[in-house]
Image: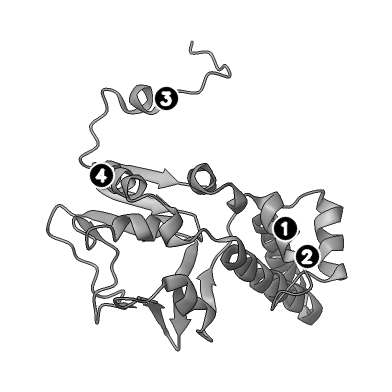
Amino acid sequence: MSTIDAHLLDWEEAVGGISLQDGGILIGNGASIAIWERFNYPSLFGVSERSELETSLRVDDTRIFGEFETTDFEMILCALRNTIKVLTALDIPATCITERYDHIRRALVVAVQSVHVQHLQIPESTLESIADELRTFKYVYSTNYDLLLYWAIMYQSASGFKDFFWADGRSFDPSNTNITDNSTRILFLHGALHLYVNGHRTRKLAANDGEDLLTLFENSRDTPLFFSFR
């Protein structure tokens, strides 16, 4: 019988002897925090309370976090979403809960953008290392909202990666997802800062030469596509 202890495998131990050609990897918030510590939830929560932000947490919002004794936005958003489902099933108006959900979600978007590391602050060698490692997998699943993974796969013009946004270079078409080559497939399970919904289509913000994607986001009126799951 195998035993469970506190030993954390290093990368070489974790993947040693495993064939990754048809495998996948799930990248969570810890990967982003390892590069930029301010992506942790206590940091995002603290920033989201700042009144000078475009959208900040209100007193009612922070009371909800306090009741759950957490700074985890996804836990709170999931709880609110489930509450909306329960009230809807019981034919009880859920307007105030929906308003709280939408406001907290927007506060999270603004907080992530506010604390985000600038592209030029990340060494090219870091982006190159991430891209090289990810190319060893067939699938990469990300639950992160930030741009770090996107910047990594775009390093050297996204060679070897496909993110399913190719209808016009910036749109996702669910009827056109066939990939026949050996490219690594990238899936943003929770959305991300560079993804948004326009009408009935999911689209991708893309910066042209000389543009910065974070600045492009600040100047856009579109709300990024953020999902929270538990």
Given residues 169 and 5, the one toward you in this image is 169
> Would you place residue 175 above or below residue 62 in this image?
below
Q: Amino acid at mark 2?
A: Glu
Give the residue pinned by disc 2: 49
Q: Amino acid at mark 4?
A: Asp
Q: Which numbered disc, 4 or 2, marks the residue that appears first in the sequence?
A: 2
Q: State the CA–CA distance, disc 1 to disc 2.
A: 7 Å
Q: State the CA–CA distance, disc 4 to disc 2.
A: 38 Å
Task: Name the element at disc 2.
Answer: loop
Label 4: how many residues lie within 10 Å, few (<14), some (14-19) or many (20+)?
some
Q: Which numbered disc, 4 or 1, marks the residue that appears first in the sequence?
A: 1
Q: Amino acid at mark 1?
A: Phe
Q: Residue at x 50, y 56 (%)?
A: 144
Give the residue pinned by disc 4: 132
Residue 95 lies, in percent from the top left, at: 77, 82
Q: State the CA–CA distance, disc 4 to disc 1.
A: 33 Å
> Label 4 near label 3: C-beta < 8 Å?
no
Tag shown at residue 10 = 3
In the rendered structure, the answer to whether residue 70 lies left or right of residue 22 reads right
